[in-house]
Amino acid sequence: MRMVPRLAASRPGWFAEADVVVIGSGIAGLTTAIRARNAGLRVILVTKDVVDAGSTRWAQGGIAAALAPEDSADEHFADTIVAGAGLCNEAAVRALVTEGPDAVRGLIGLGAHFDTTAEGELMLTREGGHHRDRIIHAGGDATGAEVSRALVAAVEKIRDVELIEHALALDLLTDATGAVQGVTLHVMGEGRRDGVGAVLAPVVVLATGGIGQVFSASTNPRVATGDGIALALRAGAVVTDVEFVQFHPTVLYAGPNAAGQQQLISEAVRGEGAFLVDASGQRFMTEVHPLADLAPRDVVAKAIMRRMRAEGARHVWLDGRGIGDRWPSRFPTIFEALMAQGIDPRDALIPVAPAQHYHSGGVHTDLVGRTSVPGLYACGEVAATGVHGANRLASNSLLEGLVFAERIGRDLASGLPPRRDPVASDASVGILSSTQRTVIQSSMTEGAGVLRSADSLSITSSVLEAMTFTSATERNASAWETTNIQAAASAIAYAAATRTETRGSHWREDFPDTDDANWRVRIAVRMLPDGTLTHDRMGVDR
């Protein structure tokens, strides 16, 4: 597999300095920025769109935390471990579930408002893989929007966090020792600065979100193009667990040519009693798993794909008619989106099919967010903390971003790495034409989607490796994003071909069994200076 070691871009025309650069403005990035600034550090927050346009805003399901008197951190731990299919870092999971309740209370203290009962207690619901009601929501199905609103307002109150919007991070700057000393950016004509520039800082925190646009259909916003993974790989950082791509089983089917961000039908809908049926109207999840329609997402997605293949169908159906008149109040956002498509879920079935939803892998970190490159941290979906293992438990993602951002903040408060001058890189540069994006997406969807095999992955890898990089083509945001998409796709396909077993959200048709004897390990992928990929095996507790 081959990638470009550095993006082709103009030399920086402007410079800024900070103690910490946070790239991304979802729950992970905003929380990190707040905690770093509260520690007295100079913070620049960079976001590719406007500050509230990231993946957090779109989260419907909620935040999982053991907040009920009858619940416990141990029970949340057990459910997370089961969903992770043997690859969770238990120390990371223990940090998540024990620190999670206080982190949620801190979020409420910052002004986030969650749904409550008539008695004023937090309203707790259940989602797939959980054995307790421990999911908090806001506005029924608008949890992410409320979290984003509260955190953006908190950042604005601090005032002296500098915000650079409409800025695409290009490449990390490093010193002679290989430590991070900043990042180059391209501000896309909307901010105070314009064009390519550089922010110099001894700490860069990647909070760039997911990989959605690596695939043809995704629940992720269009700004989710795998930028953080690509930046980290080009800087020599290790990425782990990248083969574990979670496909949400119930995404509104919008036709064979649908692309980009698709409408998610939250798992909470099934938590309220909705269930899946095939083309003949028969339920099928009751035959697949003891939790039936609330089984872990990988189980449900694979069952749907198998049923679709058996019937030659493009989708199955979600029957939510039993929710009845509660639809508009319990799921207002979803209800409005369905009605806009001419579907009244109170009396009609909803066509659904799996689409890329969440990436359990990413840039490898320790328990305080440090990556293998000094000065580089990662948090949120771009990071691989070890919490999710082979498959994320529903609604653990926002909690992970919150808890580990707090941990990064505490680590930064204890002292910064040394500040040194960055050195010029002698790596070759290149870029892909933006016209290659759809080729990458369709190849990944066909060969590295829900169901994979050696043959399908080989075809995908061949397509990715055959792409031609140039330094002379268009240098714009779309081309840089396309190059990042190819980098993230290459790492995913490479790791998926390497793992010759089925585990969690990684399904190999040619290796349908889980192989603990050989593969209860994490695959650590990194890029060599010539742009090729290599890997090592890593213990699950690292």
Image (spheres, rainbow, N blue to C red):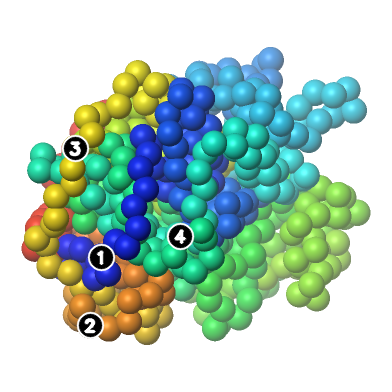
Q: x and y percent of residue 441 in the render? A: 39, 74
Nearer the observer, 307 or 79: 79
- Mark 4 or mark 2: whose residue is earlier in sequence: 4
Work out whether mark 3 precedes mark 1 in sequence or the reverse, and give the earlier one. Answer: 1
Q: Crowding at label 4, few (<14), some or many (≥20) Cα neighbours within 10 Å?
A: some
Closer to the chain start, of discs 2 and 1, is 1
In the picture, the disc for residue 472 is 2
Q: Is residue 271 above or below residue 40?
A: below
- Crowd band around label 2 with a 10 angstrom C-alpha radius: few (<14), some (14–19), many (20+): few
Report, in whole angstroms, how far the alpha carbon at label 2 lies from the one at label 1: 15 Å
Kind of element beneath mark 2:
loop
Measuring from the top left, give residue 439's x and y in whole percent: 35, 81
Q: Residue tagged by mark 3?
A: 420
The residue tagged 4 is 193
In which quadrant will I find the C terminus?
Answer: top left
Q: Earlier in the sequence, mark 2 or mark 3?
A: 3
Circle 2 or circle 1, nearest the eye:
1
Q: Please give the label number shown on residue 172.
A: none
Q: Secondary structure at mark 3?
A: loop
Residue 35 or residue 305, whichever sits in front: 35
Q: Disc number at residue 11?
A: 1
* Of labels 2 and 3, the one closer to you: 3
Query: Is residue 496 at least partly visible in the picture?
Result: no
- Image quadrant where residue 476 sits: bottom left
Mark 1: amino acid: Arg
Taking the image as shown, residue 189 lies to the left or right of residue 269, namely left
Where residue 459 sits in the image (x, y, percent)?
Answer: 24, 77
Q: CA distance from mark 4 to mark 1?
A: 15 Å
